[in-house]
Amino acid sequence: MVLGPDWKIMIPQGTPLPAVVKRQLRTTREGQKLIKVCPAVLRGDQKVHDFPALRIPVLPAPAGIAWIECVFRVDPDGRFTIWAYDPVRPTKAPEVFVA
């Protein structure tokens, strides 16, 4: 499967490890109630492994207004971790994915 237009590479191949990238991900539709983060491992532009998606609830708002913070980390041992949370509701625990 080739990468679609909505896919963004967060940590490029060949990046020295450990590598950490922090990004704000915004809604794309009016009234959107969640932001989905779909981690995958790539070789070139080919997906070789998909992981379960993180679905982070956000308050409905105009497109581009609601956002989440995501931290992507790859350790030297190959462990891949994503933390995702809505900074508007900091009392909710962040979603965490580890592979």
Image (tube, rainbow, N blue to C red):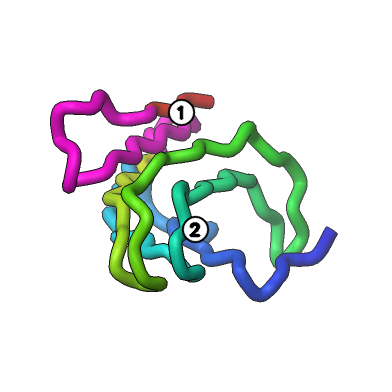
**In the image, 74: left or right of 20?**
right
The residue that disc 1 covers is: 97
Query: Which residue corresponds to the image point at 80% horizontal and 65% vertical from the top-left?
Result: 2
Quadrant location of residue 22? bottom left
Q: Which residues are magenta?
A: 74-95
Q: Is residue 91 magenta?
A: yes
Rendered-image quadrant of the N terminus? bottom right
Query: Does residue 48 lie above or below 27 as drawn?
Result: above
User: Which of the two residues, 60 or 56, is positioned nearer the viewer here?
Assistant: 60
| Secondary structure, magenta segment, majority class | loop
**In the image, 58: left or right of 11?**
left
The residue that disc 2 covers is: 14
Query: Does residue 77 lie above or below 48 as drawn?
Result: above
Q: From the top left corner, tell me how far across and down residue 26 is, in percent.
A: 37, 64
Mark 2 belongs to which amino acid? Answer: Gly
Mark 1 belongs to which amino acid? Answer: Phe
Quadrant location of residue 56? top left
Number of the label disc, if any, that sits on residue 32: none
Residue 69 in view here:
yes
Report how far apart the C-alphas of labels 1 and 2 lie in the structure.
22 Å
Q: From the top left corner, tell me how far across and down residue 31 is, in percent.
A: 44, 61
Q: Is residue 89 magenta?
A: yes
- SS assignment at label 1: strand
Give the mark nearest the N terminus, 1 or 2: 2
**In the image, 67: left or right of 32?**
left
Q: From the top left corner, tell me how far across and down residue 96 is, in percent.
A: 39, 27
Query: Which residue corresponds to the image point at 64% horizontal and 35% vertical from the top-left?
Result: 51
